[in-house]
Amino acid sequence: DIGVTGVQTCALPICDKFKTFVDSIKKAHQKFFDAHSSSELSSDLKHYITTNIKYRYINPQWMFKVKYDTATKKFSTKDLPESYFSFLKDIDLNDQNASDNDNYYTALDRYISEFNDLKNDKTIADSLSEAKKVEMKTVKLYYYRKKIFKGKILDYELTSFLKRVIMQNKIDKNIMDDLIRDYKTTCTNKEYISIINNTYNQVQKLGKGKPAPEFSLKDKDGKVISLTDLKGKIVYIDFWATWCGPCRAEMPDAKKLEEEFKDKDVVFLNINVEDNIELWNKYLVKNNDGINVFADGEQTKKLKEDYAFDGIPRYVLIDRNGKLLNANAARPSGNINKSITDALK
């Protein structure tokens, strides 16, 4: 349906049919398990399976809002009615028995994305700078989690959220320090606190002007390429994988970016991580722009530690002297060309 604004919306019957379809798969899964469950299965295995069935189908229902334009290779969201997401309100936000289940935490993420204190917040004025808006939203989302979660769920949610914020490194240090102080008086899990301390300390080493962590990786022909070899040029690193949809969606813009700076002292270094080398080689047959190198399991682990990132794509901008300009740089589809132009001056 196309509304008066020209925005594509979802007709309620279609939305309901999709939810019903997903529910039918969930019920079939549960029926199959009930039919084959026996005393031979351990209580831990039964718990794992039943918890998985309970929460694994929430994400597919939520993902109905996401659409992909094959022409522009861009992701966007459908304008769904708020009532569509009512199924999220049935989630037990403090299911302590599911505290070790990834599908449960994905479900909580989807809940927070649709129901949080920012939805009707009037204190974040449009006149504020984008950086200030990000800071205010970050603080509010931290305390929103603190308000709705308890026990082991609270510890996990605050830790995972704070770790992401630290690694993004986009908010004022004083505000970050305040959140960490509050976190340390709230979290009861010492191992989690250690994770936050280690992440924070590593990110401090990745500030503007700090030396970019060194590495040496092989290209498809076995040639070793190190960061030291590229000194004298601006280096724009793309950490990616063939299975990563958002990574591949950026490739057309990356190609345009490389064309824009083809006669300049800029190196586009694509580092394939967490991937299969055969799939990588197959991809390079038709897509071989920039310099392409592969990181195996151990190398990937080291890169993620040194450059303090979990998710991909991740972009890093380095100056001619091998010093960091931005360890969490904009994507090719963003405003990175201005940063590269400034670095060349």
Image (tube, helix red, strand yellow):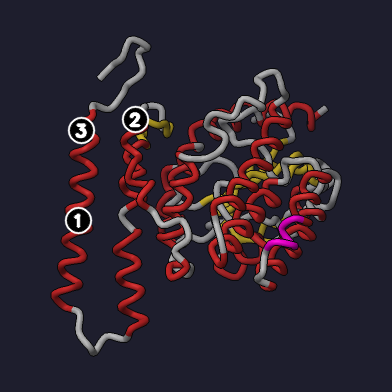
| Residue picked out by circle 1 | 25
Instruction: Categorize mark 3 by other alpha carbons within 10 Å: few (<14), some (14-19), many (20+).
Output: few
Q: Along the horizontal axis of the image, is 31 left or right of 52?
A: left
* Quarter of the rendering occupied by the N terminus: top left
Q: Identify which amino acid the numbered label 3 is placed on.
A: Ile
Q: Nearer the viewer, residue 229 or 144?
A: 144
Which of the two discs, 3 and 1, labels the residue nearer the N terminus? 3
User: Cβ–Cβ below 8 Å for labels 3 and 2?
Assistant: no
* Quarter of the rendering occupied by the C terminus: top right
The residue stretch that appears in magenta? 182-186
**What's the distance in space between the residues labelled 3 and 1, CA to CA?**
17 Å
* Label 2 SS: loop
Q: Identify which amino acid the numbered label 1 is placed on.
A: Ile
| Residue picked out by circle 2 | 80
Instruction: Categorize mark 2 by other alpha carbons within 10 Å: few (<14), some (14-19), many (20+).
Output: some
Which of the two discs, 1 and 2, labels the residue nearer the N terminus? 1
Q: Quadrant of residue 209?
A: top right
Task: Identify the residue at the far bottom of this view.
Answer: 40
Q: Is residue 342 visible?
A: yes
Find out whether residue 275 is within the magenta segment: no
Q: Identify which amino acid the numbered label 2 is placed on.
A: Leu
| Residue picked out by circle 3 | 14
* Label 3 SS: helix
Q: Position of residue 226 (x, y in %)?
A: 71, 57
Q: Residue at x 43, y 70 (%)?
A: 97
Q: Residue at x 41, y 27 (%)?
A: 72
Q: Position of residue 58 (x, y in %)?
A: 34, 51
